[in-house]
Amino acid sequence: MAIRPAEQLIHKAAWLYYAHGLRQDEVATQLKISRASVAMYLRKARETGIVNISTSTQLFTDDVMARKLEDALRLDAVWIAPENAYAADPSTDIAVLAASVFLELVKKGDRIGVAWGRTVYTIADIMSYADLQDVTVVQLCGNLGAPYSYRPDQCTMEIARRLNAKGLNFYAPLVLSTEELARALRAEPVIREQLSGISDCDLALYSVGAVDAESHLVKCGALTPDEMAALRKEGAAGVIAGQVIDGSGTVLDCSYNKRVISAELSSLRAIEKRLMVVQEDSKYEPLLAAIAGGLCTHLVIGARMAERLLEHAAPASEKAS
């Protein structure tokens, strides 16, 4: 059921006040209503339970653009964080919304696969605490060196901590020095069992990485800037769980990918709910590749990215007009 206009103001007031910590007068200025109205809306929000941030995501699922994107991209669900002038860092809105969406998607007894990166760790850091029963959070790819921030094991264990769930780390490096060593490690019973169990997950949480000098793979030392540039020339378009994909969302045939310890893309596609969160507008091309490869069923993005995706998906006749 769609939210009525009067209810939209209640949801928006609660979102600004409780999720972003704005004062009542700031909420009034943002929504162009009186402070007395804000107080009344917040009271109604408390009375009806809207102050539970996870329920307020209905405001974003009722968005017309989100519905159009779902149809155009054949996704199960899309949530769009609006552009807000009050936010110093608009990407924070996306992470706040994604944390709420994630908690809505998790069910009792679920097995959750988690990748790595700044986006995933920000979601984990923002996420509310929840005491869920029989939930297991598993790492989707091998680990990185100790000095690097947003490591896969950090993301996995922080989300497990927030959910009061069991966390299962991947005790293997993300990338090995040779293809032979990587093949041997994948054949080890413990690693083989971990990799084979990825497809049993009910939900996956990840973002998609860029393939430039700012890529996490470059920053963590897995690839040099020159090596990444060479992969771009070979068709690299994005990074999923530490693996480089091409524009069609297929694993790129390259030495780097053959040295990576990570879940196969077929295992990721077997997961029923694949929640992808993209904060940066610069990840437009990587996101298109991930969607083309069937690596996303649920999507959380910002308004500008949504507009670009909708323009990309529009029929040629609409673009011409």
Image: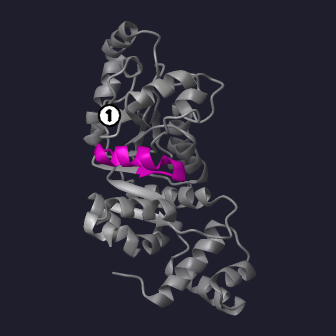
Q: Quadrant of the N terminus?
A: bottom left
The residue shown at (44%, 31%) is 232
Between 117 and 196, the one nearer to me in the picture: 117
The residue shown at (29%, 58%) is 73
23 left or right of 249? right
Q: Position of residue 36 (x, y in %)?
A: 69, 92
Q: Position of residue 12 (x, y in %)?
A: 56, 78
35 left or right of 278? right
Between 276 and 234, the one nearer to me in the picture: 234
Question: In the displayed structure, would residue 25 be above or below residue 250?
Answer: below
Q: Secondary structure at mark 1?
A: helix
Q: Is residue 135 located in the magenta-colored stretch of the structure?
A: no
The image quarter containing residue 102 is bottom left
Question: In the displayed structure, would residue 82 be above or below residue 167?
Answer: below
137 left or right of 217? left
Q: Name the chief secondary structure element in magenta.
A: helix
Q: Which portion, as a residue range, is magenta?
A: 276-295
Disc 1 packing (10 Å; few <14; some 14–19; many ≥20): many
| Tag 1: amino acid | Ile
The residue shown at (38%, 22%) is 257
Q: Position of residue 67 (x, y in %)?
A: 33, 70
Question: In the displayed structure, would residue 246 be above or below residue 253?
Answer: below
Q: Which residue is mark 1?
A: 198
Q: Is residue 141 visible?
A: no
Q: Position of residue 317 (x, y in %)?
A: 26, 68
